[in-house]
Image: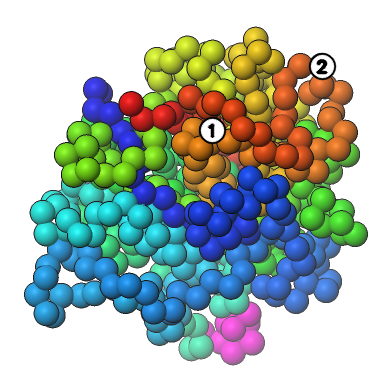
Amino acid sequence: MNRRVVVTGIGAVSPLGLNAQDTWKNALLGKSGIDSISLFDSQDCPVPFAGEVKGLDLTTPRPPLRPYGSQSPDAKVITQVSDKKELKKMGRFIQLSLAAGIEAYEDSGLDSLRDSLDSTRFGVNVGVGMGGLPEIEAVHETYRTKGYKRITPFFIPQVIPNLASGQLSILLNLKGPNVCNVTACSSSAHSIGESFHHIQLGMADLMLAGGAESVISPLGLGGFASMKALSTRVEEPQKASRPFDVDRDGFVMGEGSAMMVLEEREHALKRGAKIYGEIVGYGLSGDAYHMTSPAPEGEGGYRAMKMALERSGISKQKLHYVNAHGTSTPAGDVEEAKAICKLFPEAKEHLHISSTKSMTGHLLGAAGALEGVFALLATRDNQIPPTINLDHLDPECEKLGVSFTPHQSIQKTVEYALSNSFGFGGTNACLIFGKHA
């Protein structure tokens, strides 16, 4: 358990950008990625807006990668993430994971070393909350109108959640642990945390870890709308996601993928890797309370944060930023805020909280990975992204006396940052990132 774990590569495709750099830049600028839905005809949809990934083309030629570790002329070379024929075999969530995964892998600088790397020590874990829901809808419509014989043979591989990990494993020749955590909106945070443990325990030296989600579809939006979980601010979609604001009325659906290359510290130092930061703490818990509502006072989330903090070994005063789960729902935001301030009773002296879901919407199973990237980069750049649309802070949050970073990012030393992810079923995951030393 003494093996330290650092982050040596990141990738992201999100409503804020088609790579990690643009996504982070736009988050710091306080831009909104929420707009009218273009993925389907949303004219009759009760909530016709969401945070979409727009303009992604996996067939675009790219600089070659040789992930199979061979320099022979007939070695498989990646010159594009995928082609049109292969894309038909993949659900959209898988396609998003490939884009972010390839970016993180390339960013890590590992490709030039693959001849000397043991592929059995390099694994993958992509957390997915719901899998290929849009593809299920489309294939069911084909079956309903045209019968069994017109069901594509690729239907099952299109929709199974672990095929995001599977496709990356095949594409990059990753023969270590091949896993997919499915824990609702905590999925990708659990995937990063469990990958952290795999490396700590010596089960792998490298893990490609993160999450992917894409359920912006009639059933996806309709299902959450019927639960009264979504914002209905149709006139101002870019202002609809407003965590901690007194006028919040539900979350905004988002989609995307974010990935990290996690690496055992000595392994990274030996190869002279660029190191973004270090994962120092991981905590998880169950509310055992309600199917969809958080436990009172955020008790389950509190225990997960406390576990992450205790296992990190850092003092509370050195944790300067919390990227909150903060979905913009009436109950969840206040309960989380209370739990944070219970754990950090002197929070107003050193802590900032923000919810980047105000800009991206809620990426469900991929949320924890994207927000983990934000927390990591906050420690690298000493910048805290804002909670946009926070015009009137909820009185229950205001009385806590901590800054929720309204409207604009701030420059501040961030030694350590905590990222929270909570999900239906009462599942909680918390990650702590810090500067590498």
Q: Quick check: 23 above or below 55?
A: above
Quadrant of the snapshot with the C terminus: top left
Q: Residue at x 15, y 63 (%)?
A: 69
The magenta segment: 140-148
Q: Residue at x 66, y 29 (%)?
A: 353
Q: Position of residue 296 (x, y in %)?
A: 71, 21
The residue beneath circle 1 is 382
Most extreme residue toward the front is: 411
- In this figure, which colouring scheme has been used for the structure? rainbow
Q: Which of the two residues, 84 or 137, is positioned nearer the viewer here?
A: 84
Quadrant of residue 75 in the image?
bottom left
Q: Residue at x 31, y 51 (%)?
A: 108
Left or right: 35 as drawn, with respect to 94:
right
Q: Quick check: 408 above or below 24?
A: above
Left or right: 347 as drawn, with respect to 225:
left
Q: Secondary structure at mark 2?
A: loop
Q: Is residue 106 magenta?
A: no
The residue beneath circle 2 is 399
Residue 419: which disc?
none
Please indicate, yes or no, whether residue 262 appears anywhere in the rendered image: no
Mark 1 or 2, nearer chain start? 1
Q: Position of residue 362 (x, y in %)?
A: 65, 49
Q: Secondary structure at mark 1?
A: loop
Mark closer to the observer (1, 2):
1
Q: In this figure, what is the number of numbered marks?
A: 2
Q: Quick check: 136 above or below 141?
A: above
Residue type highlighted by circle 2: Lys
Residue type highlighted by circle 1: Asn
| Disc 2 packing (10 Å; few <14; some 14–19; many ≥20) | few
Tell me how far mark 1 sits from mark 2, CA to CA. 27 Å
Q: Which of the two residues, 163 or 197, is positioned nearer the viewer here?
A: 197
| Disc 1 packing (10 Å; few <14; some 14–19; many ≥20) | some
